Image (cartoon, rainbow, N blue to C red):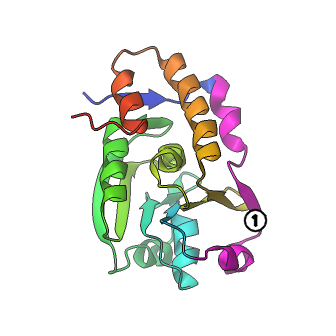
Amino acid sequence: MSVHIELPRELRPLMKKPLGILYRGKGRDTIEKFAGELSSPTKLISVGDVTTFHLLEAGIIPDICIVDDRTKRKPVSSDVSVRNRDKVYEEVSVDNPAGIITDELIRTLCEAFASEKLLRIFVRGEEDLATLPVILLAPPGSVVLYGQPDEGVVFVEVTEKKKEEIRALFEKLISKNQNNELDKIRRILDGHKDN
């Protein structure tokens, strides 16, 4: 059985608040609002099918994209699904149920950040919470982009300060889950190589 962190009901409102700068709008117009700020990030990571689709359509290729073929809990259009399977990516699949962050997802992210390959991580389940470990595991200077439903795209510049903010949120999640196995996840997120 895998180890996982579940998002408790009382912490769900925290996840509705953008973790970075919210660029309001829809589609490619929104991407164009921040495209000029993407000057050679250490890594560019997109989380979410619609965000990834619009980046690719704008000619912006994330180093890592995390998708689940769903948007707002419904299947994405075939156009989005096909475009997000761009041949430039090597694909890795992980299981990660809704409202949960699994150790499998975290380990896959660790491997993705250690790789020089362009990777598409396909999540069987839901990728919405992946943004949290992505920010923690991404090297400083990276940019994480994810969709804020019905509002736009959130632009997160990965800094040590941002990592500390997310680490504090993870500590709340871990303390609410009360599971000794979660120390393994904590150690991985803190940069230790656990097996």
Using the rendered image of the protein, determine whether residue 31 is visible from the camera's viewpoint. no
Please indicate whether residue 152 sits to the left or right of residue 166 in the image. right
Q: Is residue 191 above or below residue 29?
A: above
Q: Is residue 55 magenta?
A: no
- Which residue is rendered at x = 37% and y = 74% of the image? 85
Return the residue at label 1: 23
Which of the two residues, 157 or 178, is positioned nearer the viewer here?
157
Q: Is residue 54 left or right of residue 184?
A: right
What residue is shown at x 64% (from left), y 57% (from top)?
A: 156
The kind of residue tagged 1 is Tyr
Residue 115, compared with residue 187, is above or below; it is below
Q: Nearer the viewer, residue 4 or 61?
A: 61
Main secondary structure type of the part rendered in magenta: helix
Instruction: Give the extent of the magenta segment.
Output: 10-39
Q: Which quadrant holds residue 72? A: bottom right
Percent x, y of residue 55: 56, 76
Res. 166 in view? yes
At numbered mark 1, what does the secondary structure look like: helix, strand or loop? Answer: strand
Residue 73 drawn at (x, y percent): 54, 51
**What is the quadrant of the C terminus in the image?**
top left
Query: Tag count in the figure?
Result: 1
**127 or 72, which is in the foreground?**
127
Expressed as whole percent of the image width and height from the top left, the position of residue 172 reads 58, 24
* Most distant residue in the left direction: 195
Q: Between 164 and 65, which is closer to the camera in this rendering? A: 164
Q: Residue at x 53, y 44 (%)?
A: 132
Whether residue 52 sits left or right of residue 105 in the image: it is: right
